[in-house]
Amino acid sequence: MIKETLNARRLLCPLPVIRTQDKVKQLKPGDQLEVICTDPGVMQDIPTWCRINGHKVLETKVCDHEYSITLEVGA
């Protein structure tokens, strides 16, 4: 299992989701990806994208106007 981090700070919708999608294509099932953003819309957009595409949200965090979502890549 690999754990990667994606810096999507200062990107506005839909770019954080697009960058997440591009990064997930480089990973294997079971790998984890932490996406760090400053756009609060990702707290809905990325979990919705994960649900549609078969990935699992493991954790969400909010700290000092930054939003972190950790997901596990599905099959």
Image (cartoon, helix red, strand yellow):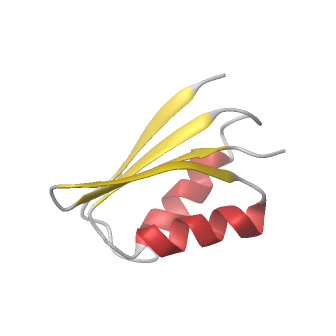
Q: Quadrant of the N terminus?
A: top right
Please provide percent x and percent y for residue 39: 30, 70
70 relative position to 38: left or right = right
Please provide percent x and percent y for residue 69: 45, 52
Q: Quadrant of residue 22?
A: bottom right
In percent of the image, x 43 and y 37: which residue is there? 5
In percent of the image, x 60 and y 24: which residue is there? 2
Please provide percent x and percent y for residue 61: 36, 52
In percent of the image, x 64 and y 68: which residue is there? 49
43 relative position to 17: left or right = left
> Farthest residue toward the left?
64
Q: Quadrant of the C terminus?
A: top right
Compared with 11, 58 (above or below) is above
Tag count = 0
Please provide percent x and percent y for residue 21: 61, 58
> Farthest residue toward the top?
1
13 relative position to 4: left or right = left
In percent of the image, x 66 and y 32: which residue is there? 31
Q: Quadrant of residue 18?
A: bottom right
